[in-house]
Amino acid sequence: MAQRPTWEGHLRLSLVACPVSLYPATSYSSDIHFHLINPETGNRIRQVVVDPEAGEVERKKLVRGFEYEKDQYVLLTDEEIKSVRLESTRTIDIERFVDQKEIDRIWWDSPYYLVPDGKAGLDAFTVIRSAMEDAGKVALARVVLGTRERVVAIEPRGKGMLLTTLRSHDEIRDAAALFDEIPAAKTDKRMVEIADRIIEQQAGPFDPSQFNDRYEDALRALIESKKGGDDGGVTAPPPRNDNVIDLMEALRKSLEQGGKPANDERRPAAKASAKKAPAKKAAAKKAPVKAPAKAAPAKRRRAG
């Protein structure tokens, strides 16, 4: 199945515009997700939307509410929310160009691939991308994704472009409140020299193919071992016991073994146990039971 775009609209630089589409540059399809299961019946738990007074309600009948005071809500329908849509809901309007090094890494958030939508605007798309490549600049623009207008950074990438959402000023916490509490410490030059040599030993190229989630690998091994009712397990690596006397001794030992930990932590975090138990008989399925209604609290006041 072809990948569906997250967003479709136009990219505009001054008077030049072209139709474009946005696709997520990252995928979470391989992540392990769990469901809540009743072990007595084997049934998956069904989530029910419940009003404390009216009981179970249909999701399609609900509206969005903003709580401006305790138990006081302003209610908004989908139509009302759509009525305040900005131009950036369908247009990525480039506002300025900056050097990439000016954007601190803490501001970078989620990446998307930006591609031309059809052949009609291919020439305009190529001109904008090539001009940005020649200038060595990153474009700043705005776009509405979901219900939020985001400032984004756009840069050439191959035949297309990479669009990355940037965090807003309110999303970044001030580090001073934490860093200022760190007490000043006098650095031992000998220790720093040894640490420098350890860094040299461990220096190497950036290889993202080596970045695997060892915990998730262990979960997959556990899941495989338990398929079909097998009672599998995992064995974690033994705890480290370096017998380190002090910081200087720790640095020296690290230098002697090339900067690697005593128990090489780069190996998988856990291995599936080979021990198997007889398969358990599957529990008979029963019809789901509706959750009993809770005692009704005092009625809530609503503000229009």
Image (cartoon, rainbow, N blue to C red):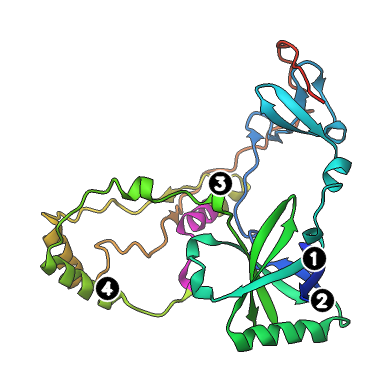
Disc 2 element: strand
**What secondary structure is marked by label 3?**
loop
- Count of numbered tags: 4
Which residue is the site of mark 1? 91
Q: Secondary structure at mark 4?
A: helix
**Segment colored magenta:** 208-222
- Horizontal side of residue 168 vs 303, given as left or right: left
Asked if marks 4 and 2 touch (Cβ < 8 Å), the reply is no
Q: Is residue 260 left or right of residue 163?
A: left
**Secondary structure found at label 1:** strand
Q: Residues within 10 Å of mark 2 (few under 14, many from 20)?
A: some
User: At label 4, which amino acid type do we have?
Assistant: Ile
Disc 3 from disc 4: Cα separation: 45 Å
Residue occupied by mark 2: 17
Q: Nearer the viewer, mark 3 or mark 2?
A: 2
* Residue 231 place in picture, x, y as percent: 52, 44
Mark 2: amino acid: Ala
Query: Which numbered tag is attached to residue 58?
Result: none
- Measured as percent of width and height from the top left, residue 21 is found at 78, 70
**Is 97 left or right of 240, judged from the image as shown?**
right
User: Is the C-beta separation of discs 1 and 2 under 8 Å?
Assistant: yes
Horizontally, is 151 left or right of 116 in the view? left
Query: Quarter holding the C terminus?
Result: top right
Q: Is 282 or 84 nearer to us in this picture?
A: 84
Q: Which mark is residue 230?
A: 3
* Residue type highlighted by circle 1: Thr
Q: Which residue is mark 4?
A: 199
Label whose residue precedes the other's in the sequence (4 or 2)? 2
**Visible residue check, residue 226:** yes
Name the front one of labels 3 and 1.
1
Disc 3: CA contacts within 10 A as few (<14), some (14-19) or many (>=20): some
Quarter of the rendering containing residue 287 = top right
